Image (cartoon, rainbow, N blue to C red):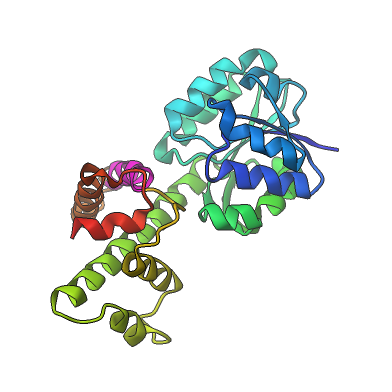
């Protein structure tokens, strides 16, 4: 039985850990706030008191943390627990920092797979994430059962660590854009004295429709916004995307507008709310 250590059991990591347990892995979990990890014991995971304890004896380590700095900090904390040649399936969204994270991991004797995911809490709980992966082809066979447990699809981007993280930035730019665009149309319909559901009904089933627009639009209109991906999380990612756009010579005009909208929603007190709360920025 393969032992997998999941580091970070927030909205995404907890669901991923449960899926790994359900697929027969020996799962150890750690979270800086232990209370967020403890419910996973009822699902069959072993809750560790420290990152070092979690990774000791693990063959695969899967960080699902906030950013590159948090991953680097946890790699430092767990340094004494890593075995030689352990596979790090690095799923935290770190953007162009992934090679730096990989270098730090390799300096500790780890092999590294770049494996950010697309999806939010519900797909994570259902094992229906899309995994974007890149890295040494020699590690793919070992990693694939883990990726199959947490995701419905794996998109292999290339052999270089960092390529998958670049694709994740492009995908999250789309997620932020479609969410903010939906919020604008909902707000515009309301501002013009219309039932905003007419907007969703008008695009439904047409080439301009999108399941995500329907999902987030309904949340904006009903006011029921269970947190899948919070405002501060997408704001962090937009910072990474903006950095990548600058380095890639891509115009950042739309990204600047998106950053402003999500920042405004956060400043209004909605930082921990679902990203659909960008509606409040209008």
Where residue 92 appears, as percent x and y from the top left, is 51, 39
Q: Nearer the viewer, residue 205 or 220?
A: 220
Q: Is residue 141 left or right of residue 132?
A: right
Q: Is residue 244 magenta?
A: yes
Q: Is residue 240 magenta?
A: yes
The residue at the far left in this view is 192
Asked whether residue 156 is in view, the answer is no
Q: Is residue 61 above or below residue 178?
A: above
Above-or-below relation of 17 to 198? above
- Residue 20 in view in this figure: yes
Q: Quadrant of residue 60?
A: top right
Point out the image quarter for the C terminus: bottom left
Is 209 located above or below residue 18 in the figure?
Answer: below
Q: Which residues are magenta?
A: 231-245
Residue 50 is situated, as x and y percent measured from the top left of the image, at: 63, 19
| Residue shown at 55% from the left, 45% from the top | 12
Displayed quadrant of residue 172: bottom left
Residue at 71% from the left image edge and 53% from the top image edge: 148
Quadrant holding the N terminus: top right
């Amino acid at each position: 039985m393969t032992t997998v250590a999941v580091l970070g059991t927030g909205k995404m990591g907890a669901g991923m850990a449960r899926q790994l347990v359900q697929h027969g892995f020996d799962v150890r979990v750690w979270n800086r706030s232990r209370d967020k990890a403890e419910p996973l014991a009822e699902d069959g995971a072993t809750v560790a008191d420290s990152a070092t304890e979690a990774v000791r004896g693990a063959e695969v380590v899967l960080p699902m943390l906030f950013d590159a700095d948090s991953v680097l900090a946890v790699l430092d904390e767990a340094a004494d627990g890593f075995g030689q040649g352990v596979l790090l399936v690095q799923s935290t969204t770190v953007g162009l920092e992934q090679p730096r994270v990989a270098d730090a991991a390799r300096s500790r004797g780890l092999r590294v797979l770049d494996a950010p995911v697309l999806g939010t809490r519900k797909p994570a709980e259902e094992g229906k994430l899309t995994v974007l992966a890149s890295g040494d082809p020699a590690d793919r066979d070992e990693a694939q059962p883990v990726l199959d447990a947490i995701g419905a699809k794996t998109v292999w981007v290339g052999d270089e660590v960092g390529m998958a993280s670049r694709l994740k930035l492009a995908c999250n730019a789309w997620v932020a854009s479609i969410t903010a665009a939906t919020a604008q149309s909902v707000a515009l319909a309301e501002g013009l004295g219309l039932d905003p559901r007419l907007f969703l009904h008008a695009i439904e089933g047409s080439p301009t429709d999108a399941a995500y627009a329907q999902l987030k639009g309904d949340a904006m209109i009903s006011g029921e916004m269970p947190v899948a991906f919070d405002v501060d999380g997408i704001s962090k990612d937009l910072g990474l995307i903006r950095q990548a756009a600058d380095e890639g010579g891509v115009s950042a005009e739309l990204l600047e507008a998106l950053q402003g909208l999500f920042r405004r929603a956060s400043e209004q007190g909605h930082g921990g709310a679902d990203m659909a709360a960008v509606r409040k920025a209008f």
